[in-house]
Image: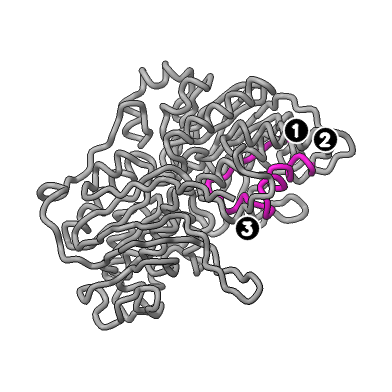
Amino acid sequence: MTATSHHSTPVVARPAAISARGWGWRHAGRARPAVRALDLDIRPGERVLLLGPSGAGKSTLLHALAGVLGDVNDDGEAGDSDESGSLLVDGAYPREQRGRAGLMQQDPETQVVLSRVGDDVAFGAENLAVPRDAIWARVHEALDDVGLCHLPLDHPTSALSGGQKQRLALAGILAMRPGLILLDEPTANLDPAGVLEVRDAVARCLDKTGATLLVVEHRVSVWKDLVDRIVVLQPGSATDGAVLLDGPPDQVLADARAMLTAAGVWVPGYVPETRLRAGSPARGTGNLLIAAEKLAVSRERPRRSGFRKLPPVPVQEDIAAQVRAGQALTVTGPNGAGKSTFALTLAGLLEPVDGAVSATTDLSRGAGIDPYKWKAEQLIERIGTVFQEPEHQFVTGKVLDELLFGPRHLGHGKERVDELLERLRLTHLVDANPYTLSGGEKRRLSVATVLAAHPQVLVLDEPTFGQDANTWAELASFLSELLDAGTAVVSVTHDAEFTAALGGTELRLVPAEPVAP
């Protein structure tokens, strides 16, 4: 959420205009520009869906329009980055127009500012000097719009799931009433019902305010009927400019379907082919590696009440699950059901509240039965975890160093690194800073860093987040091959196509019933 302007009078939202003339941007340390030679005009109040393959610079453009593109010094100069051409919002540089745009970023964790839900939603409007009474009216309206009105205003933001944090970020933007709404993969971490809630919330906001919309989403069907126009970008390495296609949604989808699918765009009705696993996805059972029995999970720490130590309140209880070699376990369910918390507990990163997670001798190999008690080096070569937020895994300043980090510390060779770079389409980024990658590239890098350590069990949280159709197919195919080779794959996902591609067993979690006061 972007809101750094301070005004003495309330901002009256009016639709913003966007103009780009030969605009380009190269991130520091990158050989190729993220965006090159962009010519684009968006009229006030227009609603535009921005498409393109992973790495085409879509997020870079949104950050630039919000005036928060990184590596810019206090004088407004681009430092070690290179900027060319012009990019204007209402005829002025975006950095001079902060507060005109509300930006919802890909990573929900980076958008939470304050510790309580109500305060977080109010933050942007407060920075825009909206009167106090009007702020709280907007807060309640925005929370209702995004389906979070059931939460008390003092509900801790730390207790929200990733999908709920995404809705919270949108509520903060809606409360700002900006003239330009910038949404970067706004529904990627949401369950199907949440996807529709967020899209409809955006539609209501646009109908009320007339704001200009620029939304990045790989899957077209969600937004097609809400937008006036589709603009397709191509990677900055292209020599014929940034815009590949531009026109009304139905026309673009009808006239250029083959071109769009080749570019990795998720056009309606299209599911990319993957290299199928040998045999049936439900074929025999492999050796048992991990068993969860009567498991209760929570991210809370134990609390004290006087002299008593109170256990955390579980988000899920009485879970039973098995992880077997060469088998897929897919964890599904609505936002807030505790899927990520369960996955982290299964992976030995959170201590169970009750019940047990037990490793068999095939996995523990002398390390003990309880993965939570394993040392770090014992854990990462047995169970590799890909977090929902990729940045939480990065520890170096270069993509190649990131991939080599695990093998070096485990005394392994780097024989798998080149294969991972090629298969996950990261070869051209070996010298790049991981934090400058696109959302889809960060996700693929986070998967690759875990795979480089050769774990027997792979636990992935939203592994297909931010992927175009081509990189999605490559990732699904690669994971299928790992399954055939005997690796166990546990995935937390809302992606039904991905669940079908991997096969195996589905564990569906539902939110626990609230405890009566």
Q: Which residue is mark 3?
A: 80
Residue 358 % position (x, y): 30, 71
Residue drawn where x is 82% and y is 36% of the image: 130
Q: Secondary structure at mark 1?
A: helix
Residue 112 magenta: yes
Residue 51 % position (x, y): 46, 33
Q: What kind of residue is marked 2?
A: Asp
Mark 1: give few (<14), some (14-19) or many (20+) Cα within 10 Å. Answer: few
Mark 1 and mark 3: Cα distance apart in space? 44 Å
Mark 3: give few (<14), some (14-19) or many (20+) Cα within 10 Å. Answer: some
Q: Is residue 445 visible?
A: no
Residue drawn where x is 37% and y is 62% of the image: 295
Residues 286 and 271: in front is: 286
Q: Secondary structure at mark 3?
A: loop
Q: Nearer the viewer, mark 2 or mark 3?
A: 2
Residue 388 % position (x, y): 45, 54
Q: Which residue is mark 2?
A: 133
Answer with mark 2 or mark 3, whichever residue precedes in sequence: 3
What's the mark number on residue 137?
1
394 relative to 124, above or below: below
Residue 334 magenta: no
Provide the residue span drawn in magenta: 100-127
